[in-house]
Amino acid sequence: MNRRTVISLMFVFLSALFFLQGLSAQKKENVEGVIFSFVDTVPEFVGGRDALIAFLTNEMEFPEKASKQGIKKGKVYLEFVVKENGELVNIAVSKSTDKIFNKEAVRLLSIMPAWKPGVLNGNKVNSRYEFPIKFGYDCVLDSK
């Protein structure tokens, strides 16, 4: 093969790779303004940790596929942005013990009511947040 053919094939391959990545990626919302990783007051589920645990416990549906496969426990680490209005966006799985739980974990965050947003220098701001949701454990969140 000549050099031009190799370069052309590499271009086609890389283009296809980026296209396929775009198809599998979750929809990312364009968040206006800066997204902070460190804030004075971290975002919080309205009602606090106990209310968050109650929400997750009441809404969680253990994946039927996991039950059928004999998988009894799993943990999904999620990251997302809490917008300055409290809305959760750009929910993504950052790590998972078994991908069978990923869809349900993302669904749970997708149906959550707005949170108290992060605060920096007295102003509500967009902030990055992450936590794991546990399936099949005594508590759906890690201890403090």
Image (spheres, rainbow, N blue to C red):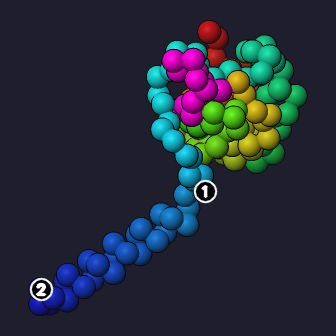
From the viewer's perspective, tell me whether residue 59 is left or right of residue 87.
right
Classify mark 1: residues with Cα within 10 Å, few (<14), some (14-19) or many (20+).
Answer: few
Label 1's element?
loop
State the residue at coordinates (20%, 81%).
7
State the residue at coordinates (40%, 69%).
17
Q: CB under 8 Å between callouts 2 and 1? A: no
Dot 2 amino acid type: Arg
Magenta segment boundaries in residue numbering: 117-128
Dot 1 amino acid type: Lys
Image quarter hosting the C terminus: top right
From the viewer's perspective, tell me whether residue 59 is left or right of residue 3.
right
Image quarter hosting the N terminus: bottom left
How far is the residue under mark 2 from the one under mark 1?
37 Å
Whether residue 98 is visible: no
State the residue at coordinates (61%, 26%).
124
- Reading the image, the residue beneath label 1 is 27
- Reading the image, the residue beneath label 2 is 3
Question: In terms of sequence position, does the residue under pointer 2 or pointer 1 come before the other?
Answer: 2
Inspect the magenta stretch and tell me whether residue 1 lies in it: no
Q: Position of residue 99 (x, y in %)?
A: 61, 45
Q: Position of residue 123 (x, y in %)?
A: 58, 23
Q: Main secondary structure of the magenta part?
A: strand
Q: Position of residue 133 (x, y in %)?
A: 67, 29
Foreground residue among 55 and 99: 55
